Amino acid sequence: MYQARGEKHWIIPDGFIPPTSAEGSAYESHESICVLNCSSEEALLRLTIFFEDREPLENILAVVPGRRTKHIRTSTLSATGASIPPGVPYAIEVLSDIPVIVQYSRLDATQAANALMSVMAHPIK
C-alpha cells in the first residue's frame, strides 16, 4: 500500500481562461488543475470556484484514482448548470479527502507566440 503525500487543502488564487486563441494556432487557450495522487486509494476532490462579481460555483466533484495523475480542464467544470466563463477572473479552492499534490497550468494561445504558465497551488496546512 502506498502512502498519500501532499496536503488536503489547496488554493489557486489566479484563474483566467483566455477568451480566444490565435487564428490558425495548433493550440487552444485553456487552463488545467493538475493533481497527483501518490496513494493506493482514490482521492475525492471537492472544488469551489470563486468570482469577483458573482456567487461561487460549489461542490464540483472530481476523482483521482490511486497512484495516478489527473489534468482537469477548468472549462469543463460546472455546478447547477453554470460554468466558468472565458475572460473572467476567478480563484479555485481544492479540498481532498486524502493528501494530494496540486499544480495549475495556463496555456495562453491568444497570440502566435504561445505562453505557458505553470505554478504550484498554495497548500493550506
Image (cartoon, helix red, strand yellow):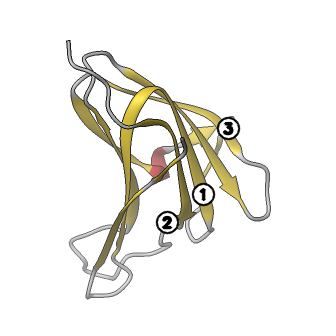
Upstream in the sequence, badge 1 or badge 3? 3
Q: Give how far across and how far down residue 20 sits, in percent.
A: 44, 75
Compute the Cα span from label 1 to label 2: 11 Å
- Cβ atoms under marks 2 and 3 closer than 8 Å: no
Camera-near label (1 vs 2) is 1
The foreground one among 68 and 122 is: 122
Disc 2: CA contacts within 10 A as few (<14), some (14-19) or many (>=20): many
Which tag, 2 or 3, sits closer to the chain's start? 2
Q: Looking at the picture, which amino acid does disc 2 mark?
A: Ile
Amino acid type of the residue tagged 1 in the rendering: Ala
Please name the residue shown 79% across and 57% down the image: 54
Q: Determine whether the residue tagged by mark 1 lies in a helix, strand or loop.
A: strand
**On the image, numbered disc 1 is attached to which residue?**
91
The furthest residue to the bottom: 112
Spot occupied by residue 27 in the image (x, y as percentages of width and height): 26, 69
Mark identifier at residue 17: 2
